[in-house]
Image: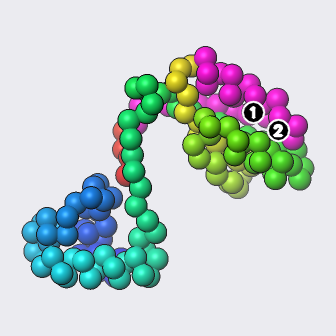
Amino acid sequence: MPSDSTDGQLLALLTENARLPAAAIGRRLGLSRTTVQSRIERLERNGTILGYTLRTVPRGGAEVRAHVHITLSARQTASVESVLRGLPQVRELHAVGGTVDLIAVLAASDTAELDRVIDRIAALDGVSRTHSMVLLSTRIQR
């Protein structure tokens, strides 16, 4: 966690653009480039910053995304997860507590492909129920 409000501001700037140069961050925060670099290194060492990521334009342009809530039969998590790992449309998979067991974030080139993948997930041995929500737009992405 950030140790002070300056760390919080630094993290907010990096979340917005992880490629922002330390000198530019320093100008915005009123700090030297070396102070910014030292703070970033400390945040990496203490586990506040776990890594950096790359966001790209989807292959072929726009993509259709959905969250699929998956309810499993007893003791089927490992086998279902193994199959889901092999589906390229599964971009994220989260184990959750509550009325469902897993949430899969899917991305497909169109709704027909998305429909086929959701049907495939629903037909897996060990999946007792799915509930899908197609994302219409992304309002905030950090």
Compared with 44, 123 (above or below) is above
Q: Taking 41 as reference, is 62 left or right?
A: right
* 1 and 2 marks in contact (CB < 8 Å): yes
Q: 90 or 29, which is in the foreground?
A: 90
Q: Position of residue 54 (x, y in %)?
A: 39, 51
* Residue drawn at 19 percent across, 82 percent down: 35
* Residue drawn at 87 percent across, 41 percent down: 126
Q: Which residues are magenta?
A: 112-138
Coloring scheme of the render? rainbow
Callout count: 2
Q: Taking 88 as reference, is 82 left or right?
A: right
Any mark on residue 121, and which? Answer: 1
Q: Amino acid at mark 1?
A: Ile
Q: Position of residue 16 (x, y in %)?
A: 29, 54
Q: Disc 1 or 2, which lies upstream in sequence?
A: 1
Q: Which residue is mark 2?
A: 127
Tell me which corner region of the image, top left, top right, bottom left or bottom right, holds residue 104: top right
Compared with 7, 21 (above or below) is above
Q: Position of residue 81 (x, y in %)?
A: 75, 48
Q: Is residue 121 magenta?
A: yes
Q: Amino acid at mark 2?
A: Val
The quadrant of the image that shows the N terminus is bottom left
Q: Say if residue 107 shows up in the picture.
A: yes
- Indicate the secondary structure of the residue bearing disc 1: helix
Compared with 15, 37 (above or below) is below
Q: Position of residue 7 (x, y in %)?
A: 28, 75
* Residue drawn at 77 percent across, 42 percent down: 83
Neighbourhood count class around disc 2 (C-alpha, 10 Å): few under 14, some 14–19, many 20 upward: some
Q: Taking 93 as reference, is 54 left or right?
A: left
Q: Is residue 108 magenta?
A: no
Mark 1 or mark 2: which is in front?
Answer: 1
